[in-house]
Amino acid sequence: MTTWIECINVYSKIFATLDKYTNERFPVIKDDTALKNISVHILEKFHINLNNSLHIMLEIQQRPLDFLSLGLIFRGMLSDIINYRYLHFIYEHFGQQDFENEVLILELDFAGNYKSIVDSEKVIGGADETKMREIDAKFFSNFAKFYSNGTKKKAEDFRVHDFRMRVNDYAAKNNINLPNRLETEWAKILLVNDQYTEHVKIAYNYLAVFQHFSGSAYNFYKNEDYLAYNPNLAAIQSLIVIDTIVKIIKVMSPGDAYIPTFIEIGVIGFRPG
């Protein structure tokens, strides 16, 4: 079984190496494409979340239930990993236009959520009709591409008409059974079928429990068997984090000397002895 000491050692190496990479490379790397821009954002979020993960790991042996907070951080990172793997896959297999369309669909989801916040602010703030019109006008000016006559567009409005057919053809040729909605995280996990797909599935299924509000879920957190497994989950998470970082660096600066450094951390990180 993996120990928290081993996890702390590996996560410290990942964080220290990523910290050095961002300090050295970010000032000179140009995020001049949509893929590079997203790559920078993901690395910045990884940098923050790895640092906070380490703070919790340092206390977790004395307070095992701190994994509740660590699991939520891991789940947020996993969402970024799933979406980045998906977008990177679309870019490599289907090209720039389909990639940009999928980026817009992610923005579409955000626009809908943000609209709910705006509507709530109007109620909480007690805005009069004039102020409400001003708030709406500002929102729709910022997110005009995602709405038509005040109604939010659908994902398919942003896709080339044969995109899903091409994705389905790829899935059929590779024996991938995709669900109907490609926007779900599970569909994105299944489509990117590589050596880390099973790791992503394990992390997804395990961390999904952290989103359940029930007595059974809380008892799951305290189950001694699963408390002992938590460092193993952290080890799995570290591998898919490293793989995503490597993918990103290959996009940002192909052939970068940091690539083998990160790969080495993943290869020898939890090796016995």
Image: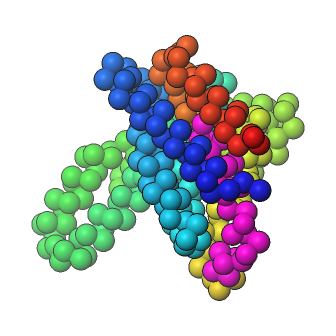
Identified at 58% across, 29% down, the residue is: 262
Q: Is residue 124 magenta?
A: no
Position of residue 167 in the picture relative to residue 148 (left or right): right
The location of residue 140, given as percent across then percent down, is 28, 51
The residue nearer to you, when weighing 164 against 235, is 235
> Could you tell me which residue is drawn at 46 percent across and 37 percent down?
16
Rendering coords of residue 40 (x, y %): 42, 33
Q: Quadrant of the N terminus?
A: bottom right
Residue at 70 percent across and 43 percent down: it is 270
**Which residues lie in the magenta part?**
218-243
Q: Is residue 113 left or right of residue 211?
A: left
* Residue 44 found in image quarter: top left
Question: Relative to 220, does residue 49 appear above or below in the rendering?
Answer: above
What predominant SS class does the magenta segment belong to?
helix
- Where in the figure is residue 68, as x and y percent of width and height? 56, 69
Q: Is residue 164 visible?
A: no
- Of residue 199 and residue 259, the one placed in the foreground of this image is 259
Asked whether residue 47 appears in the rendered view, the answer is yes
